[in-house]
Image: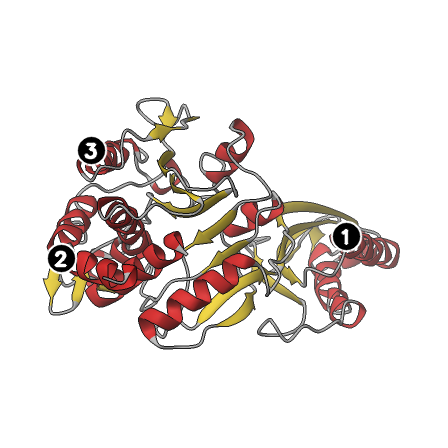
């Protein structure tokens, strides 16, 4: 029998087991400490047991120290299937942590008790990221059960802390091990579309900045005695708009195709109307095309701030809240073609390569020199009340991953 048909039948036979694992994972909330939880340890123990049961154990743990959780560390699991050739590793990275349910009244059922409704599995975490996690685990299990040795070594990486920064997740794994090589390929199935026809190969650089404008507070009836930080800050917001003209390159891979510089959060200043504020604080969310130099962006921002200081007699401090950049994966990289072929065979669609303005954990792998794509077929219900995934998507993505493993 053709290997692809063998895999299709084997994965279909695992449907009930996959649902069972989804149910078990949903019942074990893996909330990071910043989200009011105790971390991923209990969920990792459950997964390690399942990996053993499915013939994928024992798995390796690369724990990240974290004094905020009860056992003092955050788990990062690796399961390995040896490949036939020494051509590097094919990584599939998913994450164990979830976000809180939010307002309970908006849920039709208990977020941590999975409900099966037709083709839907409903519960917190079932799509983000358990659909892909379960699909990857069963893809590897089916490949191994059928005796289909992958050409490349396959490693499943199940990380912590994706929802709150990845310091105890993929960032720790990259810094604490020598498991990765530029010869590797990686799939991060943590974003996608309902059609499964978009392969993300690039991300805009993220530059989040906090601006603190300091003047001198006084009574509003005698403004000459103070320096109005709010007025200066307002002019600064407008002048930062010049960045769109200075960094005006376009790249049709992205939507929108330009760098964006958007003032967002504004902190409260004085609580009363008749006091001239001596401090003004606001934030800028910048998403910069990869071809642009973030150093040049920061130099231009500093120059704009210096002009505001001279014109208004204030001081302007700029603090980096978040900064991340990574090189794009080339559209002709082997991982792109491997995945595109598998998607065509399973879903019958032609997948296009795209760039996104948001950030994914795939950026950390790209920054380490590993060609990485982000893809899955999802309903895009992550972080919403009544989050759900389609069983058919979970089974289909499982087959895509299995075919990619043996390609």
Q: Residues at badges 2 and 3 in contact (C-beta under 8 Å)?
A: no
Q: Quadrant of the N terminus?
A: bottom left
Q: Position of residue 51 (x, y in %)?
A: 24, 37
Quarter of the image for residue 190 reads: bottom left
Q: Position of residue 371 (x, y in %)?
A: 57, 52
| Camera-nearest residue between 130 and 145 | 145
The residue located at (36%, 22%) in the rendering is: 72
Tell me which label, 1 or 2, sits earlier in the chain: 2
Q: Quadrant of the C terminus?
A: bottom left
The CA span between labels 1 and 2 is 55 Å
Colouring: secondary structure
Tell us which disc is closer to us: 2 or 3. Answer: 2
Q: Residues within 10 Å of mark 2 (few under 14, many from 20)?
A: few
Quarter of the image for residue 156 reads: top left
The CA span between labels 1 and 3 is 48 Å
Which residue was labeled with disc 1?
Answer: 298
| Camera-nearest residue between 159 and 27 | 159
Taking the image as shown, residue 269 lies to the left or right of residue 86, namely right
Which residue was labeled with disc 3?
Answer: 49
Q: Residues at badges 1 and 2 in contact (C-beta under 8 Å)?
A: no
Residue furthest out toward the right: 310
Q: Is residue 388 visible?
A: no
Q: Position of residue 309 (x, y in %)?
A: 83, 53
Q: Is residue 332 visible?
A: yes
Which residue was labeled with disc 2?
Answer: 13
Tell me which label, 1 or 3, sits earlier in the chain: 3
């Amino acid at each position: 029998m053709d290997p692809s048909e063998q895999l299709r039948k084997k994965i279909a036979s695992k449907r009930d087991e996959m649902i069972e694992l989804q149910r078990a994972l949903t019942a074990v909330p893996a909330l990071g400490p910043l989200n009011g939880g105790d971390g991923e340890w209990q969920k990792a123990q459950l997964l390690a047991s399942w990996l053993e049961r499915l013939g994928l154990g024992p798995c390796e743990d690369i724990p990240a120290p974290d004094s905020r959780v009860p056992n003092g560390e955050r788990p990062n699991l690796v399961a390995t299937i040896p490949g036939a050739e020494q051509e590097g590793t094919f990584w599939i990275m998913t994450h164990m942590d979830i976000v809180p349910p939010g307002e309970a009244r908006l849920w039709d059922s208990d977020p941590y008790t999975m409900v099966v409704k037709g083709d839907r599995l409903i519960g917190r975490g079932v799509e983000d990221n358990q659909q892909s996690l379960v699909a990857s685990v069963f893809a590897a299990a089916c490949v191994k059960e059928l005796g289909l040795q992958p050409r490349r070594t396959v490693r499943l990486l199940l990380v912590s802390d994706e929802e709150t920064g990845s310091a105890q997740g993929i960032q720790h794994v990259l810094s604490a091990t020598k498991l990765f090589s530029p010869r590797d390929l990686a799939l991060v199935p943590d974003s996608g579309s309902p059609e499964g026809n978009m392969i993300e190969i690039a991300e805009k650089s993220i530059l989040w900045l906090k601006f603190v404008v300091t003047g001198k507070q006084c009574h509003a009836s005698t403004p000459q005695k103070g320096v109005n930080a709010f007025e200066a800050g307002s002019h600064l917001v407008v002048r930062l708009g010049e960045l769109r003209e200075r960094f005006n390159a376009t790249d049709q891979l992205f939507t929108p195709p330009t760098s964006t510089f958007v003032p967002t959060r504004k902190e409260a200043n004085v609580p009363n109307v008749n006091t001239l504020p001596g401090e003004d604080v606001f934030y800028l969310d910048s998403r910069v095309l990869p071809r642009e130099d973030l150093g040049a962006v920061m130099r231009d921002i500093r120059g704009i701030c210096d002009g505001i200081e001279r014109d208004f007699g204030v001081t302007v401090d700029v603090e980096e809240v978040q900064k991340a950049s990574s090189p794009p994966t080339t559209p002709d990289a082997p991982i792109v073609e491997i995945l595109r072929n598998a998607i065509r065979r399973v879903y019958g669609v032609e997948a296009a390569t795209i760039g996104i303005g948001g950030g994914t954990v795939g950026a950390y792998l790209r920054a380490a020199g590993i060609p990485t794509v982000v893809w899955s077929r999802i309903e895009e219900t992550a972080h919403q009340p009544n989050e759900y995934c389609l069983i058919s998507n979970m089974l289909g993505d499982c087959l895509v991953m299995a075919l990619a493993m043996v390609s």
